[in-house]
Image (tube, rainbow, N blue to C red):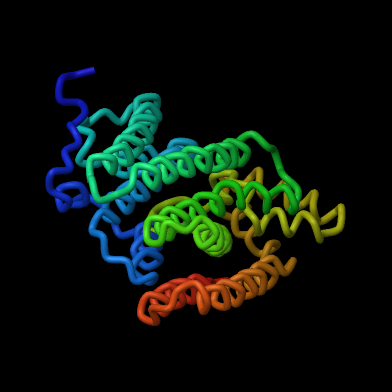
Amino acid sequence: MNEGFFSEIKLDNLAEATEDVRDSYATILTYSCYYGLGATNDSILILANVADLITRVLKLFDDVIDNDIDVAYWHARSKYINTDDKVRGSLVNLGTVLFAKAGELLSNLHHRDFIPPQVVAKIQGETFKNIVPVVEGQQASILVENPTLESAVQIAEMKSGCFYGLVCWNAAYFAKFDEDLAHKFFEFGKLFGMIVQIANDMSDIWSHEGNPSDLKQGVWSLPIAYSMSVLAAEERTILESSLFAARNSEEAEKKARDMLIKSGAFVYWQIENQVRINRAKTMLKTLIPNGKEREKLIHLMERLITVTPK
């Protein structure tokens, strides 16, 4: 490992800690939940950075699995890593390092003397506790072959639900030091995570900006799990055959996509997402008194429901 491969984290200047934070669902949630509760401590920028780093790791692992090495490299790049190495194994190792950097950032909260030590310890404990089901969910999405609809939903809740639940928990607890309130935010975050996952799975049935679709990459997404649960045996066989052939055939890819649409998968998940958004809106009315931040999150969720078959 070359000298200078990793950059030292310095938090004397909070702006320095966040200059490379990317605008993502996780960082938006961090700020909106925190500021929406009327809190103003600028150390929330550290938690936003932690959320950003973990987001990069999860996306990096997904990209390496899908063999999108250049995209994985982009997700790995941060102010803490100085390397041009795009080797698959090295990128996975970089993801592990980014996890460690997130932990190091959390430990830096201890150096800010106006933050009670027990608050920092609680945030660290919840972060590491909830990262476990997130990683387990990501592993299950790789290792569980052709999961049932129920299993696919459980995996999504672990992978996406627990992650966004953690993001909301950290922000709310840091704002009010109230565990009961933080757990309510965790439940909102789990809903938000599923909304994001469903929207992404529907959208990724098509290729985007040169990136291949889930069908071409052999990803067993939520729309596929639904279709397999409602189609007759003969149609399931045809869909399975089309999905297998889709990796090398645009015609088979289109056939599989058409079967998903005709089976009602998009209508089903559109309704499921709308139900979750309605529940999340109801929760936000009591959780976030700040109308501006609440409306920002509602607008974000409503944008996620606009995926329609093309």
In the image, 205 versus 157, the foreground residue is 157
Residue at x 20%, y 41% (from the top left corner): 79
Q: Residue 33, located in which quarter of the rendered image? A: bottom left
In the image, 267 versus 256, the foreground residue is 267
Is 245 located above or below residue 282 in the figure? above
- Asked whether residue 197 appears in the rendered view, the answer is no
- Asked whether residue 300 appears in the rendered view, the answer is yes
- The image position of residue 21, as x and y in percent, is 26, 52
- Residue found farthest to the top: 1
Residue at x 64%, y 47% (from the top left corner): 155
Q: Residue 281, located in which quarter of the rendered image? A: bottom right
In the image, 7 versus 173, the foreground residue is 173
- The image position of residue 229, as x and y in percent, is 79, 56
Is 118 located above or below residue 35 in the figure? above
- The image position of residue 264, as x and y in percent, is 72, 69
Residue 79 is left or right of residue 222, and the answer is: left
- The image position of residue 254, as x and y in percent, is 60, 59
- Give the total number of marks visible in the rendering: 0
Q: Residue 293, located in which quarter of the rendered image? A: bottom left
Q: Quadrant for the N terminus, please.
A: top left
Residue 72 is left or right of residue 8, and the answer is: right
- Residue found farthest to the left: 13
Residue at x 68%, y 62% (from the top left corner): 260
Q: Quadrant for the C terminus, please.
A: bottom right
Is 299 located above or below residue 31 in the figure? below
In the image, 177 versus 228, the foreground residue is 177
Residue 218 is left or right of residue 125, and the answer is: right
Residue at x 18%, y 32% (from the top left corner): 7
